[in-house]
Amino acid sequence: MIRFLFVKNRKNGIIFSMSNQGELTKIRHSLAHLLAAAVLELYQDAKPTIGPAIDNGFYYDFEFSSPINDTELPKIEKRMREILKTWGQFTPTPVSQEEALKIFSDNPYKQELINEINVREEGLTTYKSGKFIDLCRGGHVDDAGEIKSDAFKLSRVAGAYWRGDEKNTMLTRIYGLAFKNKEELEKYELMIEEAKKRDHKKLGPELDLFMFHHTSPGMPYWLPKGVIFYNELVKFWREEHQKRGYQEIVSPILNKKELYITSGHFDHYWSDMFVANMGEGEEYGIKAMNCPNAHVVFGHKTRSYRDLPLRLSDTDTLHRFERSGTLNGLLRVREFRQDDAHIYVTENQIESEYKEVFDIVKRFYSIFGLEYSFRLGTRDPKNFMGDVETWNKAETTLKKILEDSGVNFFVLEGDAAFYGPKVDILMKDALGREWQMGTVQLDFQQPRRFNLEYTAQDGSKKTPIAIHRVIYGSLERFIGILIEHVAGAFPVWLSPVQVIILPISEKHREYARAVFSKLKESGIRAELDDSNETLGKKIRNAKTSKVPYFLVLGDKEVASDNVTVEKREGESEKMSLENFIKKLKEEIANKGY
């Protein structure tokens, strides 16, 4: 079944669509007004700015004369419930620009918004409930009595720049949770508590996978176990792509500015890149994307229609200047790698190639039991390269491919890359959270800018079409999400340590070392815990490290030349070492299938 709807806009990573304009969104929007009313009663010199509904509740940004923190939220929340009892309907009043400026004469933030609104086309409206009045376009509950006082809760205080620009004033953002009833709120709070236990920023260092250091913000250090995990993921990616005819390339991390002028990234992306100027009169960009280099590789030799589709893949290190306030563990970094590829095709190969890419998506996501859907991003009328006719053709092509695929998808208008429409991969994790991961982008523009061409069957010269695609997306981000999805309990083939050997006492160490040697010789990633700790302590340590298997070796195992296999999930079985190795190698080869 195809899920198909149009989405008008997206802000701060939150999707606003027609489906959002339902009862719950109206409740959340109304609660943002209620929050502002309570704050103004308690902090009379506060200046409210904007307060939208978001995917799990609402927030409102304020300027306070003195900072507040989370300890003051119960007081504000209590006042919200008191005010709610006195509220009725939300009453709209159309106002002129002059009237609006007068109403909000003491609030420079509201005045800035009022002066930017095209009054002739959009109009200005205030909404009032109780004594509180706010500048608003609407979208509230019909009556405040529809809001259940036990179904919302203020959650936290955070900093936020006015209008998201770090050059502007830092405001105080108060977040709230809101659901239809108390049961849904409690269910969400339980999910949040579970998410904290799974937090990759906590589990990653605990499992010795990665760390960060203040001298390189947003750039992870991969520790030995993390490198094993990372390399196994890339190895799987490489093997699967070699089967499908991809050819891997490596290209320079530093490129002259002229390369990005040709690609269009200088006009559309330069401010988000790290830039190097070595004083020789030339400016270099530190690579933030792979596509310009892939185009250089395509264009370095004569190409024929027989070469197409030409699939060039790479996992080069990329750098993007993400603002410090947005950095978030592995989920938002400045240094990362992508499971990237650029595919050059003729126009009549687009549909078949997309089907091949969707097949890779299915393989890569199903292996981890991940649900996914697609989102089609269409042309941003203010930020695109090329002609509208070509864009319309590309968007029509992608829409047909998605409809024929049978995979759930929806359309987000204006969310395309500047050079072409894209299909983003949205993934759901074990907690039901949705993440944007990989992307598949159709590009008619950049091959023209690089003067790429191939010789067609009739001998004429034609421009190829480029498909930019990443499946996992940023490998760093995917790993962070995967850690949380499985709570650090990785499948055997990805686990940095697959088996821990636990001799019960000193007299069993010799046998344990022999078992350890055979496992290593068989290519199994094993560790030997021959410390003087008690068996109980060793088992607890093994479980904490989330290793899939541990072998307990005592008198019975030594006498029978067997091993007692304990699974991470708690099951136990006795078998010969040879059978265990055979079984484990099959499990690794099958990737859990």
Image (spheres, helix red, strand yellow):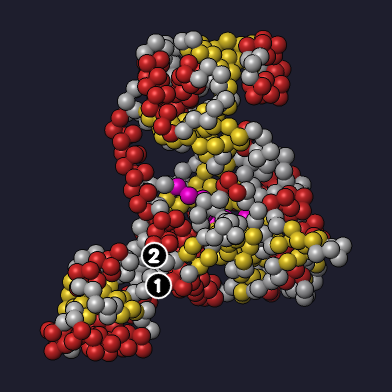
Q: Residue at x 39, y 24 (%)?
A: 75
Viewer-proximal residue among 92 and 244: 92
Q: Is residue 573 above or below residue 114?
A: below
- Of helix, strand and loop, which one carries label 1? loop
User: The disc labelled 1 sits on which kind of residue?
Assistant: Pro
Left or right: 272, with 355 as reference point: right
Q: In the image, which disc is placed on residue 362?
A: none
Main SS of residues in magenta: strand
Q: Identify the magenta region.
A: 434-442
Q: In the image, which disc is placed on residue 207?
A: 2
Viewer-proximal residue among 353 and 15: 15
User: How far across and down, in percent of the image, does residue 383 sit?
Assistant: 72, 43
User: How far across and down, in percent of the image, does residue 29 sit?
Assistant: 48, 25
User: How far across and down, in percent of the image, does residue 211 sit?
Assistant: 49, 62
The mark that comes first in sequence, 1 or 2, is: 2
Quarter holding residue 313? bottom right
Q: Is residue 5 above or below residue 290?
A: above
Q: Which residue is mark 1?
A: 496
State the residue lying farthest toward the right: 281
Q: Residue at x 70, y 49 (%)?
A: 418
- Of helix, strand and loop, which one carries label 2? loop
